[in-house]
Structures are given as structure tokens and as C-alpha cells.
Image (cartoon, rainbow, N blue to C red):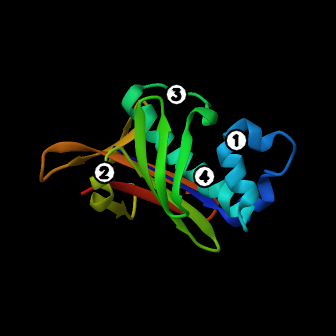
Amino acid sequence: MIGNDIVDLFLARKESNWRRKGYLEKIFTQEEQNLIHNDSNPEQMVWNLWTRKESSYKIYNRETGISGYFPLRLKCHFEDEFSGIVSIGDFVFYTQTQITDSYIYSIAVSRLELLDNIITLENFENIKKENGIPFIFDLPSNSIKPVSISHHGRFQRIITLR
């Protein structure tokens, strides 16, 4: 399974006050808050962690059918600013993050080897939704493949598996 999330940093600066009292405590574990406070660019770290959690949540929701708002249950374990894992209960997701001056983008997968099989789609052609969850029917393999869609501000990414 796959998931992705993107944050437009310009829009996030305009719309989110992550520095307000209580914000970090509602979303991030103490260990994650320490990463934020000790980082040379705490704003970047906030969105780095958030996109990892959100991309992992998309897989968790698809695999379990459980939806809700529980970011503290999704725990980021940092390898470095570009990779790591996110866990929730017995589930572990592997993440890869891209950081630019304009956006932060994370992809999560349920198995590490799937990171090599991600492809980006250019449009919504042939994408369908069932219970709000996107998929695409792959003619060559005669199978249904998962799709993950993320958009924020000026940016959008649509991914599936090869």
C-alpha cells in the first residue's frame, strides 16, 4: 500500500499558526516535539513530521477501514530528514520525504521494497473512488492498484504502484 502528503509551505505559513500554545502537543509526541524544538528549522520539521504522519495514515485507513483524527498515535521514528518509519500499533510504514523551499512532500509505503515501485500520475484519468478511497484499474495486469492523491495550495501529487 501507498500514501502521500504534500504541504505548500507558503500557504502553511499563511494559514497555520503551529507556534500557538497547545498546537504541537495535540499532534506530536514528546520525542517529535523535541525534534522540532532542537531543529535549526523548526517550521520545516513540523511539516516534515506532519506529511509523514498523514501519508502513513492514508495507508492505515485503507488497510483497516479505521478513520479519525489521532495524530498522536502515529509515531515518527527518524532516520534522517529524508527517511524514517511511522508506526501505529502493530503497523509500520516506511517514509521518504522531499524538502524544497516551496513544499515538503512525503510518501509512505507498507513494505520498504515498494518505494522502488512508485510512479507519479499526471492526471486523474482512469482513477475511481470506492468509499472515498482512490484506485485505478490496470489493464495490462487486469488488477486494481491503489492510488494516493495529495494536494495543498499550489501543489498536487498523484501516485500509484508500477
The image shows residue 28, relative to residue 83, as above or below, that is above
The tag on residue 49 is 4
Residue of label 3: 67
* Dot in front, 1 or 2: 1
Q: Which residue is mark 1?
A: 30
Marks 1 and 3: which is nearer the front?
1
Q: Give the number of the mark in front: 1 or 4.
A: 1
Mark 4, residues whose alpha carbon is within 10 Å: few (<14), some, or many (≥20)?
A: many
C-alpha gap between disc 1 and disc 3: 23 Å
Instruction: Give the secondary structure at mark 3.
Output: loop
Q: Residue at image x 66%, y 59%?
A: 45
Mark 1 or 4, nearer chain start: 1
Q: Amino acid at mark 4?
A: Leu
Q: Amino acid at mark 1?
A: Gln
The amino acid marked with disc number 2 is Asn
Residue 79 picture location, percent across and down: 49, 58
Q: Nearer the viewer, residue 88 or 47?
A: 88
Residue 142 horizontal side relative to residue 121, left or right: left
- Residue at position x 55%, y 46% from top? 76
Lower sequence index among marks 1 and 3? 1
Is the C-beta separation of discs 3 and 2 under 8 Å?
A: no
- Mark-to-mark CA distance, 1 and 2: 42 Å
**Residue at image point 12% right, 49% down:** 141
Q: Who comes first in sequence, dot 3 or dot 2? A: 3
Q: Identify the amino acid type marked 3.
A: Ser
